[in-house]
């Protein structure tokens, strides 16, 4: 169970090893290559998709067919809980950003599991509530902040390890997708990156690498917006 799908997922973390094994037996392993879909909007399905390894991008399509990125999922994250709990068809798309291993739970299996282990349902509810809170934060950011402060907030949210007051982060998706996530254009995002760099707040590295060199000033930019 050391590297099993279930052992990586926070909502199953409180179960005993024996119960985790039972949950594992319900999972349907799925391997996706880059660009393959885990599911599409309006598919007649009801399933919880858990990321074991790799990454999934969750997005919607606008009226003109352009993608609106919602979030990027990594190991231990999940999606599809809305269709599982409500029975409604999904209204978004989930596509692998690279080779990804998934564990898929069908509605009936998950319903039986929650009946036997109500704490799993509570954990799912807690994670979904946290996701809603994050969504509200993003909406507030999009409506009340300029592109620079939105980008600053996003970069600070990516940072996890600091060395000598500097954190180097890697954008999880292409810059055009980051622009979509921040509800701006690639051109505006590029200008915001260059502006933060010219102020000495960040250093733009190769590829998708960005180093945060002045976290306090970057946070001040967020707070003042």
Image: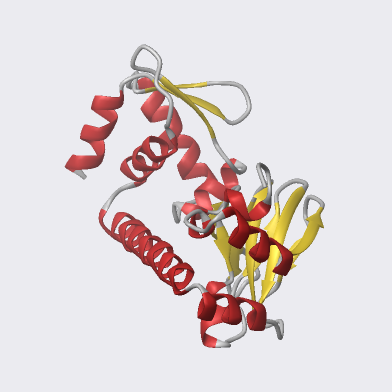
User: Residue at point 57% right, 65% down?
Assistant: 79
Residue 96 occupies which quadrant of the picture? bottom right
Task: Name the outermost residue toward the left.
Answer: 224
- The colour scheme used to paint the residues is secondary structure
Q: Position of residue 149 (x, y in %)?
A: 31, 42
User: Is 38 placed left or right of 71 in the picture?
Assistant: right
Give the percent coordinates (x, y) of residue 213: 37, 19
Residue 96 visible at all: yes
Q: Residue at coordinates 67% horizontally, 47% vertically from top-left?
A: 1
**Residue 167 appears left or right of 56:** left
> Which image quarter: residue 6?
bottom right
* 16 sits to left or right of 45: left
Residue 40, image x, y percentages: 70, 73
Q: Height in image: 68 above or below 181?
A: below
In which quadrant of the rendered image does the C terminus lie? top left
Q: Position of residue 63 (x, y in %)?
A: 59, 76
Residue 21 vertical position relative to residue 114 in the rendered view, above or below: above
What residue is drawn where x is 53% and y is 59%? Answer: 12
Tell me the residue at 31%/57% (across/down): 137
In the depicted structure, whether residue 174 falls above or below residue 131: above
Question: Does residue 58 appear in the picture of this structure?
Answer: no
Residue sitting nearer the eye, 32 or 183: 32
Viewer-proximal residue among 190 and 159: 159
Quadrant in the rendering for residue 160: top left
Count of numbered labels shown in the rendering: 0
Measured along the vertical axis of the image, is residue 102 above or below residue 53?
below
């Amino acid at each position: 169970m050391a590297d099993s799908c279930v052992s990586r997922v926070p909502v199953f973390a409180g179960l005993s090893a024996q119960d985790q094994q039972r949950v594992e037996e319900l999972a349907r392993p799925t391997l996706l290559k880059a660009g393959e879909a885990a599911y599409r909007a309006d598919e007649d399905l009801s399933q919880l998709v858990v990321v074991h390894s790799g990454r999934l991008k969750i997005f919607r399509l606008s009226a003109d067919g352009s993608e609106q990125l919602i979030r990027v999922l990594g190991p231990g994250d999940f999606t599809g809980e809305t269709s599982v709990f409500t029975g409604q068809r999904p209204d978004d798309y989930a596509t692998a950003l690279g080779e990804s291993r998934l564990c898929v739970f069908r509605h009936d299996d998950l319903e039986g599991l929650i009946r036997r282990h109500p704490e799993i349902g509570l954990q799912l509810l807690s994670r979904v509530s946290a996701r809603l809170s994050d969504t509200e934060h993003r909406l507030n950011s999009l409506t009340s902040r300029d592109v620079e402060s939105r980008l600053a907030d996003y970069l600070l949210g990516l940072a996890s390890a600091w060395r000598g007051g500097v954190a180097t982060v890697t954008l999880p998706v292409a810059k055009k997708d980051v622009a979509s996530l921040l509800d701006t254009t690639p051109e505006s995002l590029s200008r915001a990156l260059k502006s933060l760099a010219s102020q000495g707040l960040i250093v733009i590295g190769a590829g998708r690498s960005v180093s945060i060199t002045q976290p306090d000033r970057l946070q001040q930019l967020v707070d003042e917006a």
